[in-house]
Each structure stands twice: as C-alpha cells, then as structure tokens.
Image (spheres, coloured by chain):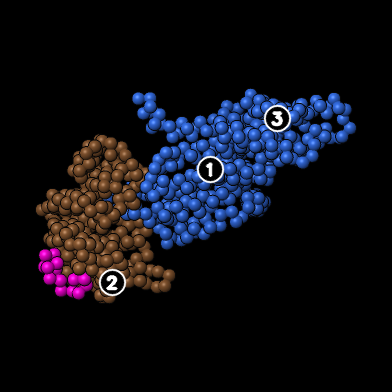
Chain colours: A brown, B blue
C-alpha cells in the first residue's frame, strides 16, 4: 500500500533503453531513445531540457499516460511494482499504481465542471473504503496542508472560480492526497510568476519529503535543480546528454550542452545574475 | 439572505422567465407567417367567390382576418392568451380539442424514439471510447458519418416493405392498433401510456406490434445526428489533460468515464434539443406512412384543406413545444457545465 514505508522497493524507477515513438501521417517519429534512469526511493530527480527534448514524453511514458498512437519500448521499465512493458495499451489508460502526476497548468488539469471538494474527495476515496463524510473532512485538511486559508469556500468552488496560485495548490493536494510513492511533476510552476513558483516548489518538496514520496520533476530551468533536486538528468533531442549528482553536474558540467544551458538560463536560482547568453549551435 | 439566494439561483430563474417572452415573439412570427400564405383564405374556405359582402365579413371575423393588421394582431394575441384558437370552418371541430388529443400522441412516439436513440448512442459511444479498434466501434463511426444520408421516408417505405410485406414481422401500417379494438380509457392522454395503465393486454400487444417499426425508423434515422456530435466531443474530452489528471490521481474507472461524459455531453444535449425538433418533423412523415393519427397528420390535413385556423394552431403548438425543449436543454446544460451560466467569467473564455 502507498505510504507503507516498510514494504517499499529500493528503487522507485528502473528504466533501461527506453524508446518512445509516435505514429504520425509520415511514419514513426522517435521522441525519446536510449533513455535509462534509476531513481531510488525518496530521491528527488530533475529532468532538464529545452522544449522538444523529449522530457515530457519520458514523463508521460513513466506515468503510463501516453495515448494509443504512441509506442513505448524498453529492456527494463519498472515503476514502483509495475512492469510498463507488460502493460496492455488502452484508449483510456489506467493509473500506474502509486504514481501521481502534477501538470504545468492546473486550469487544464483540473476538471472544470466539478467542485474542488468533489475532485479532491474522489481522489482521497480512490479505491479505498473511506466514507464520503470522512473524505470531506480529509479534503479540508489537505487544502490547509497546501496552504489554502479558507478551505470551506474552496471546497465548494469550481476551478475557474479560483486564482492561478490556488488552482495549482489544489492540483498538488489532489495529486498527493492518495499518498503516492512517486510524484511526476511536469513543469509544475512554469506557468506562474517567480515568487509563486518558489513557494510552490518549496511546498511540493516539503510535502513529498513528509510523505516519503519520490519526486521526478521535469523543468527547463536548470537553475531550479540546484535547490530542489538531488540528481539531475539533462536531455537534448530525445537523448540523455548527462546525468549525475546535481551539485557536481552544475559545478562542472561535462557535456557542452549542459554548460550552454547553464549559461543561458534565466533562472530563479540565479536572480542576481543579470547577463544572459544566447545559445548558438550547440548539439 | 434573499439577495444571496437570488445571486445563487438567478441563472435558472432568469432563463425560465425568458420563456414567455420567447413564446410571445414566436406567436407574432406565426401571425405573420400564416398571413403570407398565398390566396384569400376566406374565398378558399367558402369554396367559391360568389359570397355576399355580409357572408364574407362573417367568415373574416371567424378567421380573425377583419379590420386593420394591428387590430388583427391584437385579436390574435388575445385568442392565444385566452387559449381560444377557434373552431375549424372546414370540419366544425374545435381546434384546441383536436390538438389536445393529437399532441400527446405525437410527443409520445417522438419521446420514445428519442430515449431509445440517446440510450443506443450513449452505449455505442462509451463502448467505442473504451475499445476504439473494435469492429463494433468502427461500425458506430461509419453509422454516425452516415447522418442524414437516408431520409426518413425512404427508411419508412423500406421498413414497411421488408418487415411487413416480405417478412411479416410488423403489423399492417394501419394505425396505432388493430381496427376493431377500443382505445384505453383516457387517463393521461398519452395513448401508449394509457394502454399500459389499463392493463388491457390485447390492446397493448397490438400497439407494440404496430408501433415498433415506426419508432425503429425514427431511431435509425435520427440517432446518427447525435452520435456524430457525441463521438467527436468524447474524443476531445478523452484527450483533455483533465482526463489524464483524473486517471493519475487514482480515482476508480467509473469516475474517469463519468468525468469524460460530463465534459462531453453539453454538445450532445444541445443536439438532442434539435433532435426533438427533427423527430416532431419526422413524425409528420411517419404518421402519414403508418396512418397513425397525430399532429403530423393534422398538419398535412390542414395544408391540404387550406384550414387556416388549424394550420395557425399547429404552428403555434409546435413552436411552443420546441421552445420548451430548448428551455430544458439550456437548464440541463447550465447544470452540467456551470460555466455556461450567465455572468460566469472563465479565463481565456470570457
């Protein structure tokens, strides 16, 4: 069961030679190839890369949420206790047990027609036998936990009635209330302003630390990794160009691409650095 | 307290309050529409043009055609408000009485057909959503694309030919039940419902034998129009990030499916409103083909005999029905998707 620390596998993610392809009218398009990653339980890993580097494809593949037109192949692909290669693909996918996802924009991720209380309540009840009334109480507590001051009002509200920051907090509460073993955060704060981003990243990392949840974060901001990840994976054009301990990679990048990314990134981590560099022809 | 209640409930109160306004505007439209019919209704009804001025005037008054246009409009609206639509000058029957027994009969068939069409559509669409590569799903997609390709009367004639003439599975297209049977005692006004309530099994089985084919024709002819719309909106809703987030948050399967359907259904509900209009129109053809007495037959009769008052009443009634259906559609949609309520501001959609 999620949350039961004693039974946890040592590695939350074990992926080797992952390849993700999409069927297009002009044949197969390979978005990710030769992707290997091992994440031990409780670690915080950041996948960094520019748009189109395949980082989102990796993330959706690991969450088991790719559409029917996508093909996922790998020599090993174990997420928590699920072997992704042995799963049948479905038009409407099933959740990979123990894996939750936080998306970039809560306005799209939250269901627009249901109240926050209903969405949070169904996520809390999940497959479990919690009563409706109990789930309601827990939902209120979760809203407080993600820093919402008037949970009673927010529970009755629908997503479009909330501010952008509140929606993002609600989404984090829904993703974490089932106490997942792995949280995949796909650019969780890129749609927000700087101060809010920092607040929400603090929130995500502190909650996942409390729950013992492994965190896999996708970002295009390499500076963010410094504060919020233990390990970093740098991706470019569907391949891993470098991975390792965050401190080491950021201090002494071995790949040219990483160095270039570091030099040109306007980052929350380096707000004092006013000069930006433009990246020219690095591959 | 009252102000708060008003603020939270105003969306539907306002919409319901609009209904009389719409009805009023439609009544005026009907007034002008029937006056556009070519020919002098007085002379057509009298059947000859040698009338004394006195006779002419009397018929004019009975038809509500005397005096200035403004005067006629006032007389007409007065009659509509007091629900006094007159007595047909052709067969001497009270127009309102005719409509009172014909309307439920037509609505009943249209409603049964609509409920079956919606049920079939939902089942096929949900199945196709879960198993898009299954042959049944492919058939559903093909069938939906055929929307409106075959007109009702072709289906009706083909149905009679195959199921009555060749196979003999359906009863003769001679009305709602076998000649010689007595109708069920009138309790609700809806003939089939009355037969059910009367527990007259002979009448009921005769009705089933007579009605399944016309209902089937209406269903087969109209289901693709809503299926096409629902399939497309389900495809969009499935691909939404909201669906992925629901799945990833670990809710049971049925919650995911209901979530997709609720986001996809407003377009279908709107289509169902139009479908009801189609079905009322289709009923005109079906009632002729199967000799079922109802509104359609009445309208055809009225046009054939240039029965001015009957035609006017028919148009008013159909317009009122359609307006009520549109009201229901709006209320259902505003309940399903609160963003559709007036005054709701949504980012990127305001």
Q: Residue B293 versus residue B258: which sits nearer the camera? A: B258
Which secondary structure lies at badge 1?
helix
Which tag, 3 or 1, sits closer to the chain's start? Answer: 3
Which secondary structure lies at badge 3?
helix
Foreground label between 1 and 2: 2
- Which is the main secondary structure of the residues drawn in magenta? helix
Q: Is residue B43 left or right of residue A196?
A: right
Residue position for label 1:
B273
Disc number for residue B70 = 3
Q: Position of residue A144 (x, y in %)?
A: 20, 41
Disc number for residue A237 = 2
The residues tagged by marks 2 and 3 sit, at their Cα atoms, a distance apart of 76 Å
Identify which residue is drawn at 48% across, 49% down.
B121
Q: Which residues are magenta?
A: A244-260
Total numbered labels: 3
Question: Can you see residue A138?
Answer: no
């Amino acid at each position: 069961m999620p949350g039961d620390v004693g039974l946890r596998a040592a590695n939350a993610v074990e992926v080797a030679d992952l390849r993700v392809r999409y069927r297009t009218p002009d044949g197969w398009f390979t978005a990710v190839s030769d992707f290997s990653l091992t994440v031990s339980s409780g670690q915080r890993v950041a996948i960094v890369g520019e748009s189109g580097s395949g980082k989102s494809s990796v993330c959706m593949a690991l969450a088991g949420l790719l559409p029917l037109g996508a093909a996922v192949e790998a020599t090993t692909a174990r997420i928590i206790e699920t072997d992704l290669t042995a799963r049948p693909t479905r038009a409407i996918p099933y959740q990979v047990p123990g894996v939750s996802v936080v998306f970039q924009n809560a306005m799209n991720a939250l269901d627009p027609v249901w109240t926050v209380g209903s969405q949070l309540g169904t996520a809390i009840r999940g497959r479990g036998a919690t009563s409706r009334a109990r789930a309601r109480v827990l939902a209120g507590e979760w809203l407080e936990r993600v820093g919402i001051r008037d949970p009673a009002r927010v529970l009755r509200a629908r997503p479009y009635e909330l501010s952008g920051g509140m929606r993002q907090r609600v989404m984090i509460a829904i993703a974490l209330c089932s106490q997942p073993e792995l949280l995949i955060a796909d650019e969780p704060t890129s749609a927000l302003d700087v101060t809010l981003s920092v607040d929400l990243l603090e929130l995500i990392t502190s909650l996942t630390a409390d729950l013992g949840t492994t965190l896999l974060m996708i970002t295009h901001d390499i500076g963010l990794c410094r504060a919020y990840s233990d390990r970093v994976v740098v991706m470019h054009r569907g391949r891993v160009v470098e991975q390792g301990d965050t401190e080491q990679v950021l201090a002494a990048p071995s790949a040219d691409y990483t160095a270039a990314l570091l030099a040109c990134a306007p980052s929350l981590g380096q707000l004092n650095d006013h000069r930006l560099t433009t990246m020219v022809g690095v591959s | 307290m009252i102000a708060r209640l008003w603020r939270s409930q105003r969306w539907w109160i306002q919409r319901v309050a609009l209904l009389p306004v719409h009805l009023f505007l439609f009544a005026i439209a009907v007034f002008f529409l029937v006056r556009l019919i070519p020919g002098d209704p007085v002379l057509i009804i009298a059947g000859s043009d040698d009338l004394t001025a006195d006779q002419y005037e009397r018929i004019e008054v009975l038809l509500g055609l005397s005096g200035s246009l403004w005067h006629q409009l006032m007389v007409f609206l007065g009659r509509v408000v007091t629900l006094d639509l007159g007595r047909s000058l052709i067969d001497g029957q009270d127009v309102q009485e005719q409509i009172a027994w014909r309307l439920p009969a037509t609505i009943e068939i249209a409603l049964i057909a609509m409920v079956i069409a919606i049920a079939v559509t939902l089942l096929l669409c949900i199945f196709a959503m879960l198993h898009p590569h299954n042959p049944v799903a492919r058939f559903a997609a093909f069938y939906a694309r055929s929307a409106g390709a075959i007109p009702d009367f072709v289906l009706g004639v083909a149905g009679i030919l195959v199921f009555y003439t060749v196979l003999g599975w359906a009863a003769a297209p001679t009305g709602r039940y076998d000649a010689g049977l007595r109708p069920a005692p009138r309790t609700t006004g809806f003939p089939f419902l009355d037969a059910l309530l009367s527990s007259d099994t002979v009448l009921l089985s005769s009705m089933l034998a007579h009605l399944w084919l016309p209902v089937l024709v209406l269903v087969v002819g109209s289901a693709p129009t809503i299926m096409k719309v629902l399939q497309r909106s389900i495809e969009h809703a499935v691909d939404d990030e909201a669906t992925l987030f629901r799945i990833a948050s670990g809710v049971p399967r049925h919650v995911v499916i209901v979530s997709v359907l609720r986001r996809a259904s407003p377009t279908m509900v709107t289509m169902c409103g139009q479908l009801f209009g189609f079905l009322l129109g289709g009923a005109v053809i079906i009632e002729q083909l199967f000799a079922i007495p109802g509104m359609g037959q009445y309208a055809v009769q009225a046009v054939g005999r240039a029965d001015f008052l009957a035609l006017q009443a028919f148009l008013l009634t159909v317009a009122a029905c359609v307006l009520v259906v549109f009201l229901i559609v709006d209320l259902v949609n505003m309940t399903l998707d609160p963003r559709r309520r007036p005054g709701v501001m949504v980012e990127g959609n305001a």
